[in-house]
Amino acid sequence: MEARALVAWLEGDEELDLEAWRHRMVCGRRPAVPFGRRTDLSDQLEMLAEGFVGECGLVWVHAALNVALRRGVQSERNARRFLALWQGHADLLLELLDARWLISACDSFADVHPDPDQAALAASASFLVNTVKLYETERQGAPGAPPASPFPAAVSFRELFDGLTTFLPERGDMVANLVVRLEAATARALRRPGPFPVVAALLRELVNRLLGHGSVFQRARPLARFPWPAALAPLPLLAPPAAPCGSPGPFCVASPSADAPGWLLLHDGSRLAQGFHLGRLASGQALADGLARRGLVARGWVNEGSALEAQLAAAPGPVRLLVLDAAGLRPDGERARALRQACLQARRSGVATAVIQAGALWDDWEPFERAFLSHGALAEAPERLAPLQVEDPALLLFEELLVSFEPPGAGRLPLAVVDSPDPGLASSLQRIAGEAAAPLRTMTAAALDRLRRQVPLASAPATAAAITPAAAWPRLLRAADLPRAALWLGDRSSALLAALCADVAIAVPPGATAAALGLVQRFGLEDRALLPADWCPGDPAATQGLLAERAAAWDTATWDRLRQCRHQARADIEAMLDSLAYLAGVSPPEAPMTEDPRP
């Protein structure tokens, strides 16, 4: 249905709510990497969606625009839409698109950019990466297995063609100079006042991908007399458009019926993260989808209590329920107190109010009155706020999505690392990732910026050993990352929950957040997931040995117990959704779906 809606947009003159798609996740099953061309545009977009399962909806919109431009569908209008998409959401697209779609974007800029200089730069970026693709393809197709070293035998100085000579890594400085020039040129463009130079940012990001993703640039660097960095120095992240205090529009892409009962989300973590926060995005969408199945439509969201009254007045239909998602809030914090006042304000306006993901500390948060979750208790005191103490709703969506994700063909990596909200622990985890050449992921744009600024990027020979392995270059966590490792170490509760839903072991360091420790305790994994209190992150060999032991300790009995706990958590979340619907005056379904979706 959504593919047909995208086609109608591509072929029509109405505009798409890109902000809504930014906070929407592509759902479905992921049987294979999309390949080929379908004649029907809707079929083509549905095929492409299979490759974007678990991704932000904007990456699918971006793919749809590229396909439309290649096929000549309303070329002028869709060219304007393509340029506007990049100008407004480059921060997200640069992080979430893989090299294939970044190259596709360069090709589109080369075709439609109104500035011929920018079009030429985009074509040059595409030519650079596709040249490496051509070389790597030829290398893979050469007789015998590809050599382990990029230069298995001594390379002699000789002419290649038209005056070009061979590159001698032990003597030449060609690549180092090339990287320096690209860094300087793109940095100048990105610091220039005026509209954001998207094409320069695209080129810079593609250079980073070439330097650190198994290409000849990465393989040749250890042999070079004049080494080049593993990545270009990070520039300040492009700040996305400031999220308003609230929006009367839904945060799902469908248009709800005007007379259907609705609800508002208070404290929208996905928007507050100013980027792609996999956990908060999945939680918000699972909540919206679950309530929609019970007859409640999303009427919008609000992040500040001061905007609540206006939101209630501007909602396109009746609002019967306000849901405060308390994940990440400190009950005694200033923001929590302000949101409490918003809840009281909603109750005075006759809107039922509930708190989810509150945590035990909220039990004593007066003047809210504790209400039991049984429908009978709620019927006796429907005016009470109900603090629903259950699991993260994201579990429902994670299990639906990750059941179809398979580990990569080459097998799982032994370790992947996700950071911590605590800067000190985050630095320790970053060091572990660097020492183990393990993927390093985080959940928010602010944390990503901080981690990248701590990466050593020295290129002088004396410090070449300090160049961070490309695997440990920080990236935002995406759903496809989760099955690629045998064990995830870290302190982000939503990332750890997603890993467990993907049947991947986790390890949690001492000093982790209450949310991460609570997740381990609720699933009964203390003996498997918690690292000892005397764990010393400064000893790389001991740490890697300990993590290997912990990964091996996840036996069949552990996985069986975990699946039972997840099954119970699903039942608890479905019961919570029933209670929310009951609070709003909507009858819950007779038989909530709590069966295990796995075969």
Image: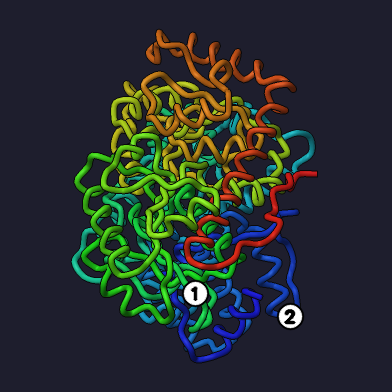
Residue 165 picture location, percent across and down = 51, 44
Q: Residue furthest bottom?
A: 13
How many numbered discs? 2
Q: Is residue 212 visible?
A: yes
Disc 1 is placed on an element classified as: loop
Whether 518 is drawn above or below 366: the answer is above
Look at 68% across and 79% down and name the residue there. 41
Q: Which residue is mark 2?
A: 40
Frontmost residue, 407 versus 367: 367
> Is residue 470 depicted above or below 544 in this figure?
below
**What separation in Å lies between label 1 and label 2 (alpha carbons)?**
37 Å
Badge 1 crowding class, 10 Å Cα cut-off, few under 14, some 14 to 19, many 20 or more, is many
- The kind of residue tagged 1 is Pro
User: Quick check: 188 left or right of 79?
Assistant: left
Residue 474 percent coordinates (x, y):
42, 39
| Residue 226 placement (x, y as % from top left) | 38, 31
Pick the front one: 219 or 56: 56
Q: Is residue 91 visible?
A: no
Rendered image quadrant of residue 270? bottom left
User: Quick check: 82 left or right of 154?
Assistant: left
Looking at marks 1 and 2 on the same chain, the residue that comes earlier in the sequence is marked by: 2
Give the answer, above or below, for where 76 lies relative to 237. below
